[in-house]
Structures are given as structure tokens and as C-alpha cells.
Amino acid sequence: MIGQGSRFRGRHRAGMSALDLSCGDLFRRWQATMDMQEYLKNRLSFSLEKLSKHAGEWVAWSSDGKSAVASSHNPEELDGLVRAAGHDPEQCVVEGIPDSDSMLGA
């Protein structure tokens, strides 16, 4: 399941700002570029051990959920880190991973 800290990002038409589109429109455009079932299956296959390496961080996941593209304690830095890794930030799902004071997998 995608955590509370998740945010979905989507593409929008040239000439339109994100403010011109409803959240539903943005989500539908983003969802059209990926297979949600594949994403969830792949994302949920990450072991708690692998996730624990990102405790307290924000993680940008690939659109297929197979890999963590970038991570940072500061979510504002993720777009630049994702671009530096050769990926499009618009095609990533960003999720907050609870810190060590939280129980993962509970």
C-alpha cells in the first residue's frame, strides 16, 4: 500500500499550469502512463530490510515500482536527484518512509 506521505505526479498539456487541472485530472494523466497493478506489485516486493535503509527519508520510486530512483531527507531535493539519476521526476512516485521510531510493516 502506498504510504500516507505519497504524492502522485502527472504530466499536463503544454500551456496549462498544474493549477488549471484538477487533482483528478493530474492523477488520471499520470495513471495513464503506468500500470498501477504492476507498480504496486513491484513496490510491495521490497523487503523491510531494504526499506529500512531509507528510514526517515523521502523516496522517488520508478513508475514501475521496481527501483528507488533517489532518496533524501529533504523532499525539496528529490527532483534534482531524480534528474541527476537520468529519470523524469514527472514519472516518479514519491513516498515518505517512516523513521526508526515507527514500525515498518505493521
Image (cartoon, rainbow, N blue to C red):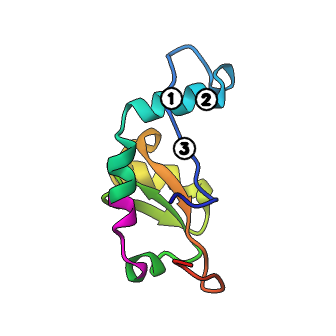
Is 54 in front, or is 66? Answer: 66
Q: Position of residue 68 (x, y in %)?
A: 38, 62
Q: Point out the tag, 3 or 1, that comes first from the N-terminus.
A: 3
Residue at the disc numbered 1: 28
Q: Tell me whether circle 3 and circle 1 mark residues in contact (CB < 8 Å).
A: no
Question: Disc 3 vs disc 1: which is toward the camera?
Answer: 1
Q: Is residue 48 above or below residue 34?
A: below
Q: Secondary structure at mark 1?
A: helix
Hey, which quadrant is residue 34 in on the image?
Answer: top left
Q: Amino acid at mark 2?
A: Gly
Q: Amino acid at mark 3?
A: Phe
Sort mark 3 into few (<14), some (14-19) or many (20+) by Cα contacts within 10 Å. some
Range of the magenta residues?
Answer: 42-48
Question: Disc 3 vs disc 2: which is toward the camera?
Answer: 2
Residue at the disc numbered 3: 8
Cα–Cα span, label 3 and label 2: 10 Å
Residue 62 visible, this angle: no
Residue at the disc numbered 2: 24
